[in-house]
Amino acid sequence: MSEARTMASVPHETATGAAIVVEDVRKRYGDRQAVDGVSLQVGRGEFFGLLGPNGAGKTTLVEIMEGLRQADSGTVSVLGESPWPRNVALLPRLGVQTQSSAFFVRQTAREHLRTVAALYGASRADADSTLGTVGLADQRDVMVENLSGGQRQRLAIASALVHGPELIFLDEPTAALDPQARRDLWKVLRELKSEGRTIVYTTHHLDEAEALCDRVAILVAGSVVALDSPHHLVTAAGAPTRLLIPAERMSQEDAAAIPGVDRVTEQGGSLVLETAESGKVLQAVDALGGLDGVQTRTATLEDVYLELTGTGTATDNPTVITDTNDTEQQG
Ligand SMILES: Nc1ncnc2c1ncn2[C@@H]1O[C@H](COP(=O)(O)OP(=O)(O)OP(=O)(O)O)[C@@H](O)[C@H]1O
């Protein structure tokens, strides 16, 4: 995917205030309470993540925001308007990509996107440049039904972006993408945010939420159980950083004596040092025997998520220290 975009930036005066205000929204299907009193606000220009296990109510909540579904009770304001009953004035200002996006059959990727663009009053040039943005320029003449799953997903994303909407809803947009295409989409999304657009992003990829989102709401059984920036959620959880040091490097007693080390255990040939002051402890470890082969595992949004959703703890997946400015989480 290319970063080049031709969409006009969102006017500055719209880049303040709330894009979405949800107050005490409830939705029940039969005896299933899918959304159970959700209140939240999404700021203009904010990249807002919606996380939660299968069946938590994310899609239902997003569909209520999009004006595709009526809440049983509560109020919703989207860009200052009520999305329900279906509000046609709002539609050109919204971009919506869903897991079940529909395509025009017997059309090429370019014809499809030009058709979508025309429906919104956007130009053929907008359609062609958006195809480039999502990395489908080479597939422009391929029939939609012959695109791969990942290519079709990119076309769905392009269909949500082609008219330059102010508010973009993306539902697991990277689900079918290969790792490179996923990173390429992150760049596109960051560019959209820098243009002042608001993004509501549903994902099961916690690394993605941590890298992209200003704030995330974690939904469990229809209720918001956490809502904050990934950084605040992780620091508030207070999970220690763990340093893994080759066991022959120092004794358990020496490790435990390092100021800032709270606990030392031995695990598979490594000493595991738990600390809330990893910088200080790393300096001490460096002075004692160097950092070669030392690994660190900091708490991540995944740890917080698994704790809050009651699905256990993240598996150990240490990162080898190669650089003190490790930017893996920032993509
Ligand atoms: N149209 C419907 N009719 C009846 N029940 C529904 C309907 N849509 C969703 N549900 C139920 O409501 C609950 C919430 O579903 P929803 O799709 O909103 O969750 P979700 O968080 O988006 O899940 P996933 O991560 O699996 O997409 C689930 O128990 C689901 O089975």
Image: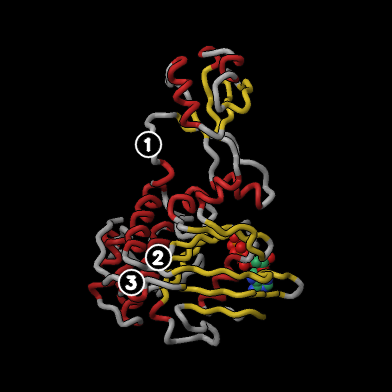
Q: Can residue 192 be seen in this view?
A: yes
Q: What kind of element bears circle 2?
A: helix
Three-letter code, disc 1: Asn
Residue 163 in the image: above or below residue 134: below
Where residue 46 sits, quadrant-wise, is: bottom left
Please give the residue where the numbered disc 2 appears in the rendered image.
Answer: 157
Residue at image x 37%, y 59%? 189
Callout 2–callout 1 Cβ contact below 8 Å: no
Q: Distance between the residues labelled 3 and 2?
A: 9 Å
State the mark number for residue 325.
1
Residue at image x 48%, y 55%? 175
Whether the residue carrying mark 3 lies under 8 Å from ligand 1 is answered with no
**Frontmost residue, 237 versus 174:** 237
Where residue 192 sits, quadrant-wise, is: bottom left
| Lower sequence index among marks 3 and 2 | 2
Of the four image quadrants, the one with ligand 1 is bottom right
